[in-house]
Image (cartoon, helix red, strand yellow):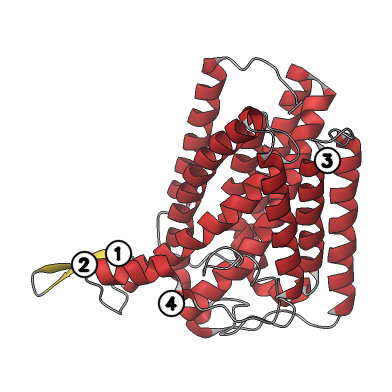
């Protein structure tokens, strides 16, 4: 596959990894107490993470030029858009397990760490496959198109986190108490160490993100197979996922038609990946950025206009703002669900 290539010194990789670790530490320290994160606090932190992500693109612009920077922004934008879909399912998982508001941030923090680890593995494996075996572009492309199709047509299916095979396996292998014990993942009952319901909810979140990571990474690999760009675009988009959840959780119903836009983006990424191994070649980055921006603008505007007059502040079980016991109408919670990949 013909793609961007530029030398990235080992110290740059180390600096980026250290920087991500520092940002995670700052996020942990800022939320070390179990307080309920309100919209204003979440909005401030979301702005910080978005500013960091956009600022890194400017560093790439000064370091490697406009093409590399534009490619990063395309990857960052599509990953940020897909992360909104994660928020819908996270809200449903929290509602299903009735996770208290004060403990949700802890699950999301460890969820972000797991998401970064999974994406790092998928990025290097996926990029290597695309570089060595050209025909994998057709497989990844077909997978993205199929995922987009499922996202567009499966909006009315219900999601059942307790049916997730990983969650069921954990409950079989690890003694579990069906209660919350503060913010602890494990506790002792009658001298026996058992997992709490908070740990089961964390497993559901992590299992969900494994499915998300596959199509998210594949979508960015459709833009570039440069592992440094794909990793940084994913990392800076995922770092703000926790704040994004608390920002949007109370407004989920206002994004009634966003899943159509995300479906288009996944299908577009699939077509782009397939075309890269044909005489057409890779589509220009400006065209890719334009399609992403236009699709998101139209789907978000369509959603906001269609739901005008709704405040989106419904409260589901467990106090989760905007979470409902069943997915809201048209909510994009089904194509990428905790139950596994599209079948």
Q: Can residue 168 be seen from the camera position used here? A: yes
Within the image, what quadrant is residue 305 found in? Answer: bottom right
* Residue that carries the numbered disc 4 in the rendered image: 162
What residue is at 47 percent from the left and 55 percent from the top?
Answer: 111
**Residue located farthest toward the left when viewing the structure as drawn:** 191
The reply to whether callout 4 and callout 2 are in contact (CB within 8 Å) is no
Position of 188 with respect to 36 (left or right) is: left
What residue is at 84 percent from the left and 83 percent from the top?
Answer: 309
Dot 3 lies on which element? Answer: helix
| Mark 2, other Cα within 10 Å: few <14 / some 14–19 / many ≥20 | some
Within the image, what quadrant is residue 221 found in? Answer: top right
Above or below 168: residue 318: below
Numbered circle sitting on residue 187:
2
The reply to whether callout 2 and callout 1 are in contact (CB within 8 Å) is yes
Above or below 53: residue 60: above
Position of 58 with respect to 176 (left or right) is: right
Circle nearer the N terminus (3, 4):
4
Q: Nearer the viewer, residue 224 or 327?
A: 224
* Residue that carries the numbered disc 1 in the rendered image: 184
* Residue that carries the numbered disc 3 in the rendered image: 275
Q: Nearer the viewer, mark 4 or mark 2?
A: 4
Q: Nearer the viewer, residue 100 or 129?
A: 129
| Mark 1, other Cα within 10 Å: few <14 / some 14–19 / many ≥20 | some
The reply to whether callout 4 and callout 1 are in contact (CB within 8 Å) is no
């Amino acid at each position: 596959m013909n793609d961007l290539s530029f030398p990235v010194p080992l110290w740059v990789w180390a600096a980026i990894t250290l920087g991500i670790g520092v940002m995670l530490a700052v996020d942990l320290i800022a939320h070390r107490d179990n307080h309920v994160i309100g919209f204003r606090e979440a909005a401030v932190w979301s702005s910080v993470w978005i500013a960091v992500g956009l600022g890194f693109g400017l560093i790439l612009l000064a370091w490697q030029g406009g093409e590399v920077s534009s490619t990063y922004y395309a990857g960052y934008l599509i990953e940020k858009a897909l992360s909104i879909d994660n928020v819908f399912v996270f809200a449903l998982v929290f509602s299903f397990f009735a996770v208290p508001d004060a403990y949700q941030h802890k699950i999301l923090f460890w969820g972000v760490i797991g998401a970064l680890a999974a994406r790092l593995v998928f990025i290097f494996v996926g990029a290597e496959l695309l570089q060595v075996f050209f025909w994998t572009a057709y497989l990844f492309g077909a997978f993205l198109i199929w995922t987009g199709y499922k996202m567009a047509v499966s909006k009315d299916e219900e999601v059942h986190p307790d049916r997730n095979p990983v969650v069921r396996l954990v409950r079989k292998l690890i003694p579990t108490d069906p209660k919350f014990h503060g913010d602890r993942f494990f506790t002792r009952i009658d001298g026996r160490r058992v997992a709490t319901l908070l740990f089961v909810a964390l497993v559901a979140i992590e299992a969900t993100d494994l499915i998300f990571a596959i199509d998210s990474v594949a979508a960015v690999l459709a833009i570039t197979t440069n592992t440094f760009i794909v990793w940084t675009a994913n990392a800076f988009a995922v770092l703000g996922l926790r704040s994004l959840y608390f920002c949007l959780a109370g407004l989920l119903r206002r994004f009634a038609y966003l899943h159509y836009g995300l479906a288009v983006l996944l299908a577009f990424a699939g077509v782009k990946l397939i075309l890269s191994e044909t005489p057409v070649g890779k589509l220009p980055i400006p065209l890719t950025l334009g399609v992403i921006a236009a699709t998101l603008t139209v789907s978000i505007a369509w959603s906001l206009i269609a739901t005008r007059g709704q405040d989106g502040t419904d409260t589901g079980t467990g106090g989760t703002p905007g979470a409902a016991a069943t997915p809201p109408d048209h909510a994009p919670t089904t194509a990428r669900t905790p139950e596994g990949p599209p079948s």
